[in-house]
Image: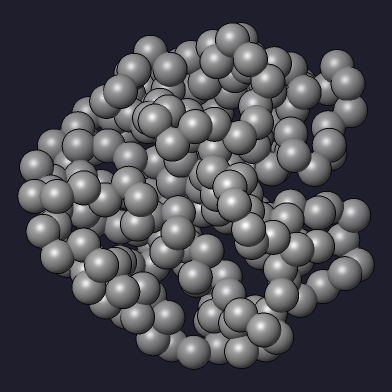
Amino acid sequence: MDFDVYCDESHPDLLISQKSSARFIVIGSLWLKRDSRKNFKNEVDEFKKQYLVGGEIKWGKVSPSRLEFYKRLISWFFDKEHNLRFRAIVIDREKVNLLTYHDNDQELGFYKFYYQLLHHWITDFNCYHIFCDFKVNRKKDRLQTLKECLGNSNLSSSVPIVQAVRASESVLIQMADLLTGLVSAKYNHSCLSGSPKDMLIQKCEGYLEKPISATGAQENKFNVFEINLKGGWQ
């Protein structure tokens, strides 16, 4: 079976900067059957028309005037049940050792975490087309290397594409941005109580019936992988 995966990230700069008040880096991914892509895009476009919303869908654009629109998107995501899935990896910057484990290269470390996000949801005998939000890399072959590593570690599956796409060109990357931003805001405590973003987090947690936090590996609707970087037994 063919799948599409749309990815975005929040606070990737934390691997090199200590200035931010945030502590956690989050990379998120939206997973769907490839033959569902057109219908899902059309449905989201219809919501934008219904709520008179223009421009990109972004966590950063959640506001009082757009709150009902963004609530509708959260409901839509959960209404799709297992036909539309989300997985995020959460990285505690205070526990990342770039010098020892990543050749003191923050970009290399970032894509190693990207690999961990994707690898564990790639299963045998399926084909995965992976689309990452465009970002400028110091080394131009990072996505090609990620593709090769995923292919080499998943020999019974196929990863023909790991491609950068600008969020403005993909409403599904925009949805990944929204859900990734939501997880990041929860972990980094960046929302004021009662604010539109806080209300959106509460909407999501209502569907989950629990606070947003690390999930077990078996959770396949809204999976949050809080990676353990301390070593030792899990």
Residue 149 is at least partly visible in this image: yes
Q: Which colour scheme is used?
A: one colour
Name the outermost residue toward the front.
233
Identity of the residue drawn at 59% across and 52% down? 233
Across the whole image, how many numbered discs are drawn on residues? 0
Horizontal and vertical percent position of residue 77: 42, 22
- Residue 40 in the image: x percent, y percent? 29, 29
Residue 12 located left or right of residue 121: right
Residue drawn at the location 42% of the way across and 64% of the way down: 115
Res. 67 in view: no
151, 83: nearer the viewer: 151
Residue found at x 38% / y 55%: 118
Residue 123 point in image, percent of width and height = 21, 47
Q: Which of 134 and 142 is in front in this view?
A: 142
Where residue 185 sits in the image (x, y, percent)? 74, 38
* Above-or-below relation of 218 to 18: above
Location of the N terminus (image quadrant): top left
* Foreground pick, 25 / 218: 218
Residue at (26, 50) in percent of width and height: 122
Query: Left or right of 60: which side holds 144?
Result: left
Image side of residue 32 versus residue 6, left or right: left
57 in relation to 164, above or below: above
